[in-house]
Image: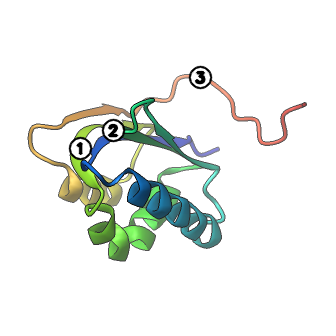
Amino acid sequence: MNDPFVYVGTWTIKPGKLEDAKRFLTEHSAFIEEREPRMIAFHVYFDEEGSKASVVQVHPDSASMELHMQVIADHMDEAFEIIDTILSEQYYGPMSQSLSETLAQWETPGVAVTKMPVHEAGFTRTNAAA
């Protein structure tokens, strides 16, 4: 069984761009859902002030994250029209050398990056009881 791969990224939203951010992220989420059938979860959260956002992605394995990076490559310029400052990036689960190299290209100097490659225990429910 492959180990899951989880990405969490947090950033500030450019002043005056909250409504643009909401629109872009809603459209971006639908775009990803349509093109990445293996992704388990993709969620965006805002703080109460609407000045920060986080994305939480759950992939079945690092190959799914590699595909994600390919799918979004042409949309990153639009993302940076709303993103002001990247605050942190967190990677959980083992990643291939290829994914590690791809992610390194996007890492911003001075931004906290956490890498936790060893998945020790846990489970994923895809059909949890209501």
Left or right of residue 54: residue 98 = left
> Circle 1 sits on which residue?
86
25 vs 101, nearest the viewer: 25
Residue 22 location, x and y as percent? 47, 54
> Circle 3 sits on which residue?
121
Q: Say which amino acid is labelled 2.
A: Ser
| Disc 1 element | strand
Q: Say which amino acid is labelled 1.
A: Ile
Q: Report the residue that reaches farthest toward the bottom.
A: 74
In this rendering, the label closer to the viewer, 1 or 2: 2
| Disc 3 element | loop
> Circle 2 sits on which residue?
51
| Disc 2 element | loop
State which quarter of the image contains the C terminus.
top right
Q: Residue at x 62, y 64 (%)?
A: 33
Q: Alpha carbon of mark 3 to alpha carbon of mark 2: how far?
A: 34 Å
Q: Quadrant of residue 49?
A: top left
